[in-house]
Amino acid sequence: MSKQIFFLSGMFRCGTNLLRSIMNQNPDFYVSPNSFLPEVFQLLHRTKETSQYKDWKRLDIDINFKDNEKYYDDIIKNTFNNYYSSYKQKYIMDQARWGAPGNFRLLMYYDFLPKKFVMLVRPFEDILKSWIRYYKIPNYRISKFCDEQMIEYGAMGQGILALETLLEHHKDNLKIISYDSLCNKPKETITELYDFLNIPLYKHKFKNFSQVDIIGNKPSIIRTNKVEKINYKNNISIPEQVKQKYKKQIMLLNEYSR
């Protein structure tokens, strides 16, 4: 059975695992952990640049099936349904940086779009401080650490690129959920998500959650008793040079985190 595919192109430290725990209560809905499928897409696509593929395309042509590139493309176009074929859920939300420019271009090239994207966001400084707390970064390393997070494939940089790409090219099919809204108004926020996805509403519980990752990986551990945002003591100071250097990105995230 063909699945209805959605994309969760969220940023780390913005509540994606909490969203997974809530949505996966619905027996018809599945939100994946971080997906490997973008890498699969990239590998299959890059194969077309190899000499072996080009020779095959030029020489190994059946007289009755001449368009062998089309048949190869069908492998890529059926990736989601093949990968999730053993899942019983009707609705699949694949979590990856699908909004990042390279991944988004592949979705467009292989006619997967339009599809509905969901993105969780949080103020820039809150995300950065969350990573600083997790890795126990000393004050003298904060500027360098931020630069590392903000490179194109960094934990923060790739997510921001994805948000910029989706706002520019796919805004009508993009639902942005702020971390504060998910924590402070979970029932209302989840109801709005169902409306956006245009699927039947499920009655969720918003306390006594289940963990989502079997290995108990610390960054993915959630508080299971109830939905609650913890306000940490403000003992981490973000250097002014970081705020100036990433002023544009700070403004973007702050705008959509309200």
Image: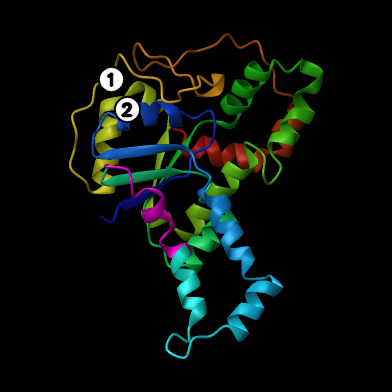
Q: Is residue 43 above or below residue 212?
A: below
Residue at figure coordinates x 48%, y 83% from the top left? 67
Decide: few, some or many residues near mark 1? Use Cα within 10 Å; few <14, some 14-19, many ≥20: some
Q: Residue at x 28, y 20 (%)?
A: 206
The answer to whether 145 is drawn above or below residue 113 in the figure is above
- Give the magenta part as a residue range: 76-88
Along the viewing direction, whichever of 161 and 201 lies nearer the viewer: 201
Is residue 191 at least partly visible in the picture? yes
In what element is the residue under mark 1? Answer: loop
Label 1 to label 2: alpha-carbon separation? 7 Å
Q: Nearer the viewer, residue 227 or 252?
A: 227
**Amino acid, disc 2:** Ile
Closest to the observer, 158 or 218: 218
Its colouring scheme is rainbow
Element at label 2? helix
Q: Picture coordinates of residue 186 (x, y %)?
A: 31, 26
Q: Position of residue 140 (x, y in %)?
A: 81, 19
Report if the CB atoms under discs 1 and 2 are less than 8 Å apart.
Answer: yes
Please tell me the numbered disc located at residue 22.
2
How would you rate the neighbour count of disc 2 (Cα within 10 Å): few for under 14, some for 14-19, many for 20 or more? many
34 left or right, relative to 150? left
Q: Is residue 181 visible?
A: no
**Per the image, is 77 magenta?**
yes
The furthest residue to the right: 140
* Chain-order first, disc 1 or disc 2: 2
Q: How many marks?
A: 2
Coordinates of residue 225 in the picture (x, y in percent): 35, 11
Residue 206: assigned label: 1
> Left of 204 or right of it: where is 150?
right
